[in-house]
Image (cartoon, helix red, strand yellow):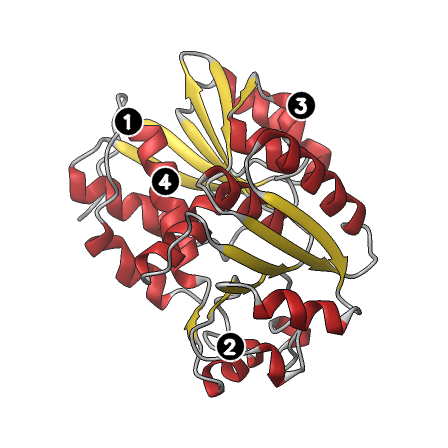
């Protein structure tokens, strides 16, 4: 459909850098068109140095909502008026809704992670998960899983800048949810095998397996995998990382980050519009995205 922008058209967008690769404009504009909504979604190149001005500008201009991507997710909160529970707990915002001049921050990445598991027949309530990574994506996934009734999460990370954040996340989730969260060093291979053996779900929430680390896996011990274990990687390019290849070879159910991208976008769409994203229209767009 050719787009017909008028003086009544409402604006949405995404802020981050680099931003030209973003799938979000195609996703949301296709959904707007399919539902006949007079909305437009654009991408804006915004880094941390101009983030405060950009957020204030979007607010002043009456932009109805916007997505937040790297490197802004974990630093945008001070410029917003209110945070949802999951955004506050995980310390990251990827969706902002302008409600009559009040900017409310949400995190829908965790919803995308959990919904991917659910759509593949994996039960969240009462389950135990082992998750590799202590960064922002991991925090969002753990937070939503805990809020949705997961029983226990074992987090594994390397001693980098995010490890301390992982420990603090565990403290918050242990205090404010009914989920038991523990943090271990990834180098503790015996503990990783032990915790995974007790888990229903194993996930990778690190960049290991993509870009310069393509062909690598955060886990190199095949004994970690077993039939009946559901394995998810937040990476979507390549579609099947070495981590997933290893899991598949051991009889695991595997999932990648493509569905996570779709479902986090769908959740943001519903927050902004109060309507369900037409997944039949948007899913093929996400499937083609590299």
Quadrant (top left/top right/bottom left/bottom right) for the C terminus = bottom left
Q: Are marks 1 and 2 in contact (CB under 8 Å)?
A: no
Foreground mark, 4 or 1, reads 4
Measured as percent of width and height from the top left, residue 230 is found at 45, 68
| Label 3: which secondary element | helix
Foreground mark, 2 or 4, reads 2
Q: Is residue 51 visible?
A: yes
Q: Nearer the viewer, residue 111 or 99?
A: 111
Q: Which mark is residue 135?
A: none
Q: Is residue 91 visible?
A: no
Instruction: Judge whether 146 appears above or below 227 on screen.
Output: above
Mark 4 — residue? 267
Foreground mark, 3 or 4, reads 4
Mark 2 surroundings: few (<14), some (14-19) or many (≥20) residues within 10 A? many
Measured as percent of width and height from the top left, residue 173 is found at 62, 37
Foreground mark, 2 or 3, reads 2
Instruction: Judge whether 222 appears above or below 160 on screen.
Output: below
- N-terminal label among 3 and 4: 3
- Compute the Cα span from label 2 to label 4: 26 Å
- Compute the Cα span from label 3 to label 4: 23 Å
Mark 1 — residue? 9
């Amino acid at each position: 459909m050719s787009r017909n922008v008028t003086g009544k058209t409402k604006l949405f967008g995404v802020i981050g850098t680099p931003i030209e690769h973003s799938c979000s404009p195609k996703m949301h504009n296709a959904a707007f068109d399919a539902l006949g909504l007079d909305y437009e979604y654009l991408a804006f190149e915004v880094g941390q140095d101009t983030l405060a001005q950009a957020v204030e500008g979007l607010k002043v201009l009456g932009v109805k909502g916007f997505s937040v991507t790297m490197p802004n997710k974990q630093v945008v909160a001070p410029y917003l008026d209110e945070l949802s529970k999951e955004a506050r707990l995980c310390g990251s915002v990827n969706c902002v809704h302008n409600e009559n001049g009040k900017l409310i921050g949400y995190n829908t990445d965790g919803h995308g992670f959990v919904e991917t598991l659910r759509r593949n027949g994996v039960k969240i309530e009462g389950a135990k998960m082992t998750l590799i990574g202590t960064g922002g994506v991991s925090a969002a996934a753990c937070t939503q899983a805990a809020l949705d009734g997961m029983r226990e999460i074992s987090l594994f990370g390397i001693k980098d800048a995010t490890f301390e954040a992982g420990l603090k996340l565990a403290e918050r989730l242990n205090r404010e949810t009914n989920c038991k969260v523990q943090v271990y060093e990834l180098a503790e291979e015996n503990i990783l095998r032990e915790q995974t053996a007790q888990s229903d779900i194993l996930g990778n929430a690190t960049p290991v397996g993509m870009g310069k680390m393509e062909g690598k896996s955060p886990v190199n011990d095949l004994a970690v995998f077993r039939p009946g274990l559901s394995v998810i990687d937040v990476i979507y390019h390549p579609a099947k990382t070495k981590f997933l290849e290893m899991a598949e070879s051991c009889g695991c159910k595997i999932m990648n980050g493509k569905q996570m991208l779709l479902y986090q976008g769908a959740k943001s769409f519903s927050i902004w519009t109060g309507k369900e994203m037409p997944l039949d229209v948007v899913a093929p767009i996400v499937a083609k995205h590299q």
